[in-house]
Image (cartoon, coloured by chain):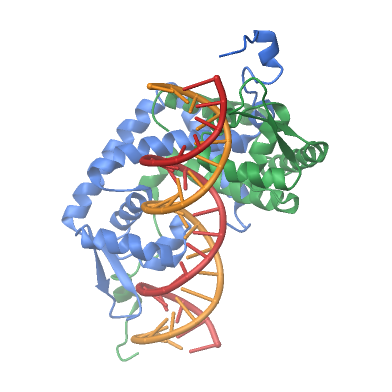
Chain colours: A blue, B green, C red, D orange
Amino acid sequence: MSKLVTNKEATQYAVQTVSDQTLRHFLGYHLKRAFNVIRSDLIQTLEPFGLRLLSYSTLVLIVDNPGIRQWQLAATLAIERPNLVVIIDELEQRGLIARERVPDDRRANALRATAVGRRLCADAVKANQAREAELLAGLSPNQRTSLIEALAAIERAGSGRGS
Amino acid sequence: MSKLVTNKEATQYAVQTVSDQTLRHFLGYHLKRAFNVIRSDLIQTLEPFGLRLLSYSTLVLIVDNPGIRQWQLAATLAIERPNLVVIIDELEQRGLIARERVPDDRRANALRATAVGRRLCADAVKANQAREAELLAGLSPNQRTSLIEALAAIERAGSGRGS
DNA sequence: TATTGTTATACTCTATAACTATA
DNA sequence: TATAGTTATAGAGTATAACAATA
C-alpha cells in the first residue's frame, strides 16, 4: 500500500462490524435464516439418497397416502400442478413410485410407492430425523414443542390469504 | 360412466384426506410453511414501495450501516456477490442509494442511502412491523420471545457448516 | 362446462467461473 | 498473488396459459 492509513481514517469510509439490528426485530428475518440452516443441512442429508427437498417430501406423502392423486399432492405441498409433473416423472423413472390408472376416473393417476421406494423413503426419513436431532440438541424438549406450536400458529394465521 | 362404482370401491383408489403426519414430525416442514406465510405476506406489504424481499433487506442494511461495502452486504445477507450487483443497481437507479468511491481502496464502493432512500426505508419498515404484529397477534409476548430465541439458536447451531 | 394431467414458457432466486481494476 | 466489483451463465423453484382427455 503506497499510503499509510490509520484506523481512524479508515473508519471514515469502512464499516467495522455490520449491524442488522433493524432486521433482527423481525420474525421473518430469523425465520429465513433458521430455515436456511435446516434447508442446507437437509439438502446434504438427502443427497446420498438422490433426493431433493421436493422429491423427498413428495415421496413421503405418496408412501403415507397410497393412491393419492397429483392434484392432492400439489395442494398439500402448496405447489402448482405443472411443477409436480417433473418430480413425479423423476420418482417414477427411478422406480420409486408408479402411476396407476384409475378405473373410476380415467383422467386421474393414483400414485403408489414401490417396495424400493418405501425402503428408500424409510431410510431417508431416518437420516432426516438423526440430523434434525443433532441440530436441535441445544433446545430443550419444552422449547422444541413450543417452537413447533408457534410455527403452526403462524401457519394458521396465514390461512385464508393467498399463497 | 359405464360402470357403477360404490363409495366402498372408490376408496380403494382415492384418498379421502391427505395425511402429512410423517412430515409434521419435522421442524423443517413447519419452518418452511411458516416462512411461506410470512414471506408471501411481506411480498404484498412491500409491493407498494416497489421493493422485493432482497432489495428491502439490502436497503435496510445500507441505511443502518452507512459506508458499507458490497462484500460486507453479501456476507450479511448470505448471498453471493454477483447476485447483489443487480440489486444495488436497481436501488441506485431509483435514487435510493449511491455508490461512493473510496479514496483508500479504489476497488471498493462505499454504499450510502440518500434522503429519499432513508424515508422510503422508514416507511417500509413501519409497514412491515404493522403487518407482522397482525400476523403474530395470536402469540403471547412470551411465545414471541422464545420463538425468536429458538430460531436464533438454530441459526447458531448451523454456523460453521456450509451455506 | 369443469377437472386432471400435461406442455411450454417465464420470472425469481441462487450458484459458479472468469474478467477488470486495483491492492 | 489476492481482493472488490462485475459480467455471463446455468440451475433450482415457482407461476400462468393453454391443450388433450375425460367427467
Residue lying farthest to the bottom in this orientation? B2
Residue closest to the eye, B156 or A129: B156
Residue closest to the eye, A105 or D13: D13
Residue C21 % position (x, y): 55, 33
Work out whether B158 lies above or below A53: above
Work out whether A77 lies above or below B26: below
Residue closest to the eye, B141 or B149: B149
Work out whether A73 lies above or below B37: below
Residue B57 % position (x, y): 64, 38
- Residue at 71% across / 42% down in the picture? B128
Residue A127 % position (x, y): 27, 36
Q: Does residue A101 appear to the left or right of A152 in the view shown?
A: left
- Residue at 43% across / 62% down in the picture? A74
Residue closest to the eye, B17 or A86: A86
Q: Quadrant of the C terminus of chain A?
A: bottom right
**Quadrant in the rendering for residue A65:** bottom left
Q: How many marks?
A: 0
**Quadrant in the rendering for residue A19:** top right
Q: Does residue B94 appear to the left or right of A101 in the view shown?
A: right
Is there any visible trace of residue B17 in the rendered image? no
Q: Quadrant of the N terminus of chain A?
A: top right
Residue A162 % position (x, y): 61, 59
Q: Does residue B56 appear to the left or right of C13 in the view shown?
A: right
Residue lying farthest to the left in this orientation? A115
